[in-house]
Image (tube, grey):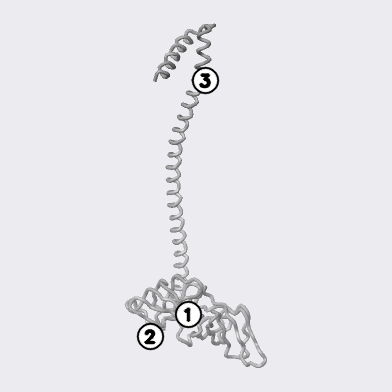
Amino acid sequence: MMIVTFVTIILIITIGITIGGRARVSMPENLIGKVITPVQKVLYKSGQGIEEAIRSLFKFRSIAKENKLLKKEVQDLNQKLIELSLTKDELNELRHLQDALNYVKENNKRNYITANVTGKDTGNWFNIFTIDVGKKHGIIKNSTVLNGDGLIGRVYEVGDNWSKVVTIIDNKSSVSFQVLRSNQYIGVIRGSVKADLTGYLIDPEAEVLVGDKLITSGLSMFEKGILIGEVKEVIKKKDELLKTIIVKPAVNFKKIDKVFIIIPEKLS
């Protein structure tokens, strides 16, 4: 305490002396100045350090608060981006379904309903999947299922508010088709465990070409005129009478979200 009092008195004396702005100082004053200056320097530096630390602390808190707000804004923006992407995907899906709806309207089919996929069997492919409509929505067995790209399959099991769909790539499925370019050429294609569509034309002289589009013929349970896919390979073996075709489906059977069901008039 005495040291602090002593230093304070000396500082007061020094201030009193320097206020006058004298040209010369006395020897005792000069000696005191030499002693006090290092102490002043330490005190000044310490004060600056404390002030800077306090300023940095407040600045850090301010930056931390600002970062928290920025993170929240980024999260909000990311969520909005996700919502917009979902909305865009859903809009595209609905546009595809509108194409299918136009097909139904053009062909005077009035019994139809849209549905969402709610589950699927294990594996990469949509061989069998479940939708969120059933008996109470008017769905019946063997209803044709499609989307804006083309034929998907048929309803094979119906519950009150759900149904199961078996697709044309399933190895238990078969579809009667006709060649769009020349509708007198007809045949049958089947699914396989590899999710390929393979089949044959009934007429051995039929001129089917790679790139030919195939549509449903209406001779089976599927509605007529729905795009199935296009021929990607034609195989003619010497020991076989009929030509074998490999067909690329129009529908992407790795991703199906929404579907369109036509209820056959003859079964409704």
Describe the element under mark 3 as helix, strand or loop.
helix
**Above or below, comparing residue 142 to residue 66 in the picture:** below
Percent position of residue 266, x then y: 39, 86
In whole angstroms, how far apart are the C-alphas of marks 3 and 2? 105 Å
Q: Which mark is residue 38?
A: 3
Q: Along the polypeptide, which appears first: circle 1 or circle 3?
A: 3
- Residues marked 3 and 2 touching at CB (< 8 Å): no
Circle 2 packing at 10 Å, graded few (<14), some (14-19), many (20+), is few
Q: Nearer the viewer, mark 2 or mark 1?
A: 1
Closest to the observer, 92 or 116: 116
**Residue drawn at (47%, 65%) of the image:** 92
**Residue drawn at (51%, 84%) of the image:** 171
Amino acid type at image mark 3: Pro
Q: Along the polypeptide, which appears first: circle 2 or circle 1?
A: 1
**Above or below, comparing residue 64 to residue 26 in the picture:** below
Q: Is residue 161 left or right of residue 40?
A: left
Circle 3 packing at 10 Å, graded few (<14), some (14-19), many (20+), is few
Amino acid type at image mark 1: Thr
Percent position of residue 81, x then y: 46, 56
Describe the element under mark 1 as helix, strand or loop.
strand
Dot 2 corresponds to which residue? 267
Describe the element under mark 2 as helix, strand or loop.
loop
Amino acid type at image mark 2: Leu
Dot 1 corresponds to which residue? 167
In whole angstroms, how far apart are the C-alphas of marks 2 and 1? 20 Å
Closest to the observer, 72 or 89: 72
Q: Is residue 23 left or right of residue 207?
A: left
Q: Along the polypeptide, which appears first: circle 3 or circle 2?
A: 3
Q: Quadrant of the C terminus?
A: bottom left
Q: Which mark is residue 79?
A: none
Q: Nearer the viewer, mark 1 or mark 3?
A: 3
